[in-house]
Image (cartoon, rainbow, N blue to C red):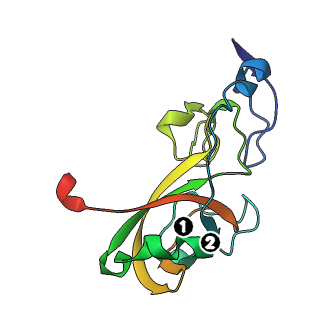
Amino acid sequence: MLVRTGNEVEGGSNSVAIRLDEEKFDKMDAATVNFIGKIRTPYKTTTDCPGQARPENGTARIELNEEMLPALKGIETKRHLQILYWLDKADRSILQCVPRWAENGEEYGVFSLRSPVRPNPIALSTVKLLSVEGTVLIVSALDCLDETPVLDIKPYIDQLK
């Protein structure tokens, strides 16, 4: 069952949002995931964080747990990586919101946006690998908050297009 509420949406607008029924939402937490590290960025709040990572936003550090060192063997040969991360501070119950760029205040479904609000707070970004320092990957900018948990890393292979 969907419920319409008047809760505040990211960006400070007092917009109407469509939220999942809380009882059904709680039952969706059936999976267990293991965080393998964290992403270090300069962004402490959602207001600081850009809506889309761009080269001018600098770099990010992916600090993996020490036990992940063997999993990094050969990663230095990759130019681009796909980073799966967990938006741990994102609202998980909003299904529609007004994006920052919407000029007319129109709502969009979260599956049509790169918004951090989603039913499952899983994010995917493709980054350029700049260097590897032990269990730390220096990559092109990521659009996430500092200390965002990392779920997985995969090489980006453009021949699969």
Residue 120 % position (x, y): 61, 38
Q: Amino acid at mark 1?
A: Leu
Residue 52 % position (x, y): 52, 59
Horizontal side of residue 159 vs 137, given as left or right: left
Compared to residue 25, the image places residue 123 above or below, namely below
| The N terminus: image quadrant | top right
Residue tagged 1 = 142
Check whether the beta carbons of the residues at disc 2 and disc 1 lie within 8 A of each other.
no
Residue tagged 2 = 65
Q: Residue at x 62, y 69 (%)?
A: 39
| SS label for mark 1 | loop
Horizontal side of residue 138 vs 94, given as left or right: left
Q: Earlier in the sequence, mark 2 or mark 1?
A: 2
Q: Amino acid at mark 2?
A: Asn
Compared to residue 4, the image places residue 124 above or below, namely below
Front residue of 129/150: it is 150
Rate crowding at label 2 as few (under 14), some (14 to 19) or many (20 or more) other CA atoms within 10 Å: some
Q: Quadrant of residue 108?
A: top right
